[in-house]
Amino acid sequence: MDRQEIIRQLKHHKKQPYLDYRLKRKTEEFTDRLFYTLFDINTTVEENLEFLALDFNELVDLACWDTVRPCTKVWERYLAELPIILEKLNLDAEAIRDCDPASLSIEEVYMAYPGFYAIAIYRLAHFLYQEGFPMVPRLMTEYAHRQTGVDINPGAQIGNSFFIDHATGVVIGETAIIKDKVKIYQGVTLGALYVDKSLQKTKRHPTIESNVTIYANATILGGETVVGENSVIGGNAWLTSSVPPNSTVFHTPEIKIKTVSNA
């Protein structure tokens, strides 16, 4: 096969007309600028909001393939929402500082906790998800996923003062509902019982009521599964049915120790 034939075949099979990877790169730049605008003391808010507006216009050009949808109006609503999002993120940071004995300062939480970063990018993406802005919210949370190991779908609904400790391996599905003052640890999955495209418009992921703690590597599955308030889910637990309020659920492993006598 000569070079021209290879090129012809590659072009023939390159079928996705909207697959412009500039969108991914621009979304990551927008996400970084947005995060620094909200938190970095050396980043000027007034000036950066102008840059963010320009960035967003580029995202509109790249992401809004359906010209009927008013993507250009989203920025004004998003801008008005940013103070509310920042207020929620400050509550998240305070919850992490107050709950984690290893936290030495609030500044450490903002700068060094991957769980906080993942929550921040989720909250910044969630509003755009609610607005129906295409692709960008998912690219934002996947950017955070790549950096932190935390996979939060931007469609999840998460209340105030949320705490993810250690972060790595956490998965929170699109239709999960998490209420206020919930603490989860590494490796926790809030997932679906099974995957089928026909379930796209249904609630597939669990509801976690307020003041629940979920320890490492617990798996909670199903759209009808509700963990009642003030409950504690122990490490490695596997849940596919609801738990009443004020419950403690734990997994008891069977441990067998084989010893070899001295010869």
Image (cartoon, helix red, strand yellow):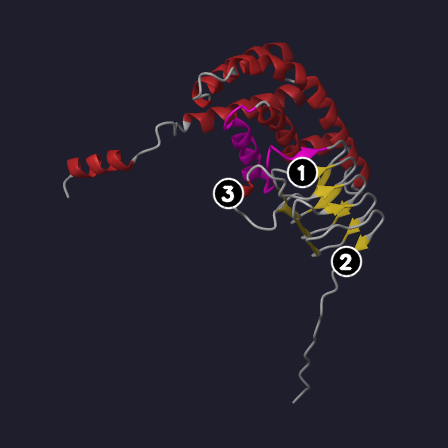
User: Mark 1 or 2 closer to N-term?
Assistant: 1
* Residue ranking furthest to the right: 246
Indicate the secondary structure of the residue bearing disc 3: helix
- Distance from the alpha carbon under mark 1 to that under mark 3: 30 Å
Q: Which residues are magenta?
A: 132-158
Expressed as whole percent of the image width and height from the top left, the position of residue 180 reads 78, 35
Pointer 1 residue: 115
Q: Mark 1: which amino acid?
A: Gly
Secondary structure under tag 1 reads: helix
Residue at numbered disc 3: 197
Q: Amino acid at mark 3?
A: Lys
In primary-sequence order, the first of circles 1 and 3 is 1
Please identify the residue farthest to the left as the structure is shown: 2
Of residues 149 and 124, the one nearer the viewer is 124
Disc 2 marks which residue? Answer: 250
Residue 104 vertical placement versus 69 (above, below): below
Residue 216: within the magenta?
A: no
Which quarter of the rendering shows the C terminus? bottom right
Residue toward you, 63 or 44: 63
Residue at point 83%, 47% (across, down) = 245
